[in-house]
Amino acid sequence: MAQINDVGGAIDAAVRLEEARLIEVRRDIHAHPELAFQETRTAGVVAGELARLGVPFRSGVGRTGVVGTIEGGRPGPTIVIRGDMDALPIGERTGLAFASRNAGLMHACGHDVHTATLLGVAAILKSLQPELSGRVRLLFQPAEEVLGGAAAMIEDGALDGVDLALGYHNHPEIPVGKFGFVRGANYAACDRFRLVVHGVSGHAAYPHAAVDPIVAAASLVGSLQTLVSRETGPLEACVVTVGAIHAGTVHNIIPDSCELLGTIRSLTLTVRLRAEAALRRICAGLEATYRTPCECDWIPGVPPTLNAEEVLDGSVAAIRRQLGEVFVPAESSMGAEDFALIAARVPSFVLRIGSGAPGRTDYLHNSDYQPDEGCIALGASALARAAVDLLAA
């Protein structure tokens, strides 16, 4: 493996030079959150920072994404490093001086941190460019929260000619300064369903003259949990959640229909396919039991996010060389990521970056979420070192 002389020291020096700026950029993005495919201001900030660093880039990739490219001075493969940029429709309650100025919107998942981290990676690798092997493609992705941005960027050629990829996410349950990794499925597959139970409306006083879809739907909610308890092996993982039920308008009318919206999450393709088949079978049986035909729409989402052993092992070894023994135990998450679509195409690894601040018990998608900003420089150092060593391997 061709090594850059004192790569660890060069990374440390580059990140020290940029850290204050990265925090400033993160706070600016945090104060101006934008929803999926609306990240025009954020993309403009990214473009401005890449231009300042001298990194060539393309805007408008995947609608509002930005792709930066660093060409190394030595031959080698092409690696993608992806960071997401979109915010959530959550009102912020942190009271921070740089809290959201956009009512009802917040960076409650830390994508502002992710964007700043990837800019840090850009700064580090740009400083190492002459001795870098291969090339690095930096994907500033829109619309992760709606699981649509990765597909849009892939459609626009963001993975063309790519050999391997790195993803990452901040994790507040891991203390800042620590990192985690999972072998196999890092995040779950996520699919949605829409079920409409059809009945016959009538007066609440005469239920025998109607066909009540609400009673059938109530039974259906319980039956769906058998997808976990009786359709999934006890050593496998599956989550079924009904998140919304819509039916009726007043207290004394049995409605014509009842709509249920939900999600099914799984860690393997086998469980995913089995869950869909069981859902359709249970819905089909509702008519015979309750006289209520059930319309079943399965809405495919993303597959499990799978870590490739060779990319994981190389990355973990590189990060240990840079930062020491910083890893803590981690386990698969039933959360979902559209980085899964990248990992399904090229060997990939998702790094978990500790963002938990001392004395706080924050969690993602919360209106008071406050990650420790120290995770930005640490994450940039870890990802940059992983990229350098993977490209030189």
Image (spheres, rainbow, N blue to C red):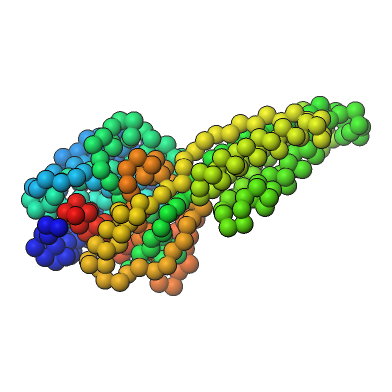
Q: Where is residue 189 in the image (x, y as percent from the top left)?
A: 49, 45
Q: Position of residue 378 (x, y in %)?
A: 27, 63
Q: Position of residue 320 (x, y in %)?
A: 26, 67
Answer with the quarter of the image where residue 128 lies: bottom left
Question: Where 74 falls versus 216 (above or below)?
Answer: below
Q: Is residue 232 visible?
A: yes
> Which residue is nearer to you in this view: 214 or 357?
214
Residue found 62% across the figure and 34% down from its top: 194
Q: Is residue 250 visible?
A: no
In the displayed structure image, the side of residue 52 where residue 259 appears, left or right: right
Question: Where 20 falls versus 248 (above or below)?
Answer: below
In the displayed structure image, the side of residue 85 where residue 1 appears, left or right: left
In the rendered image, the quadrant that contains the C terminus is bottom left
In the displayed structure image, the side of residue 156 where residue 184 appears, left or right: right
Q: Where is residue 374 in the image (x, y as percent from the top left)?
A: 30, 65
- Count the numbered circles shown: 0
Residue found 42% across the figure and 48% down from its top: 305
Residue found 65% across the figure and 39% down from its top: 279
> Which residue is nearer to you in this view: 358 or 232?
232
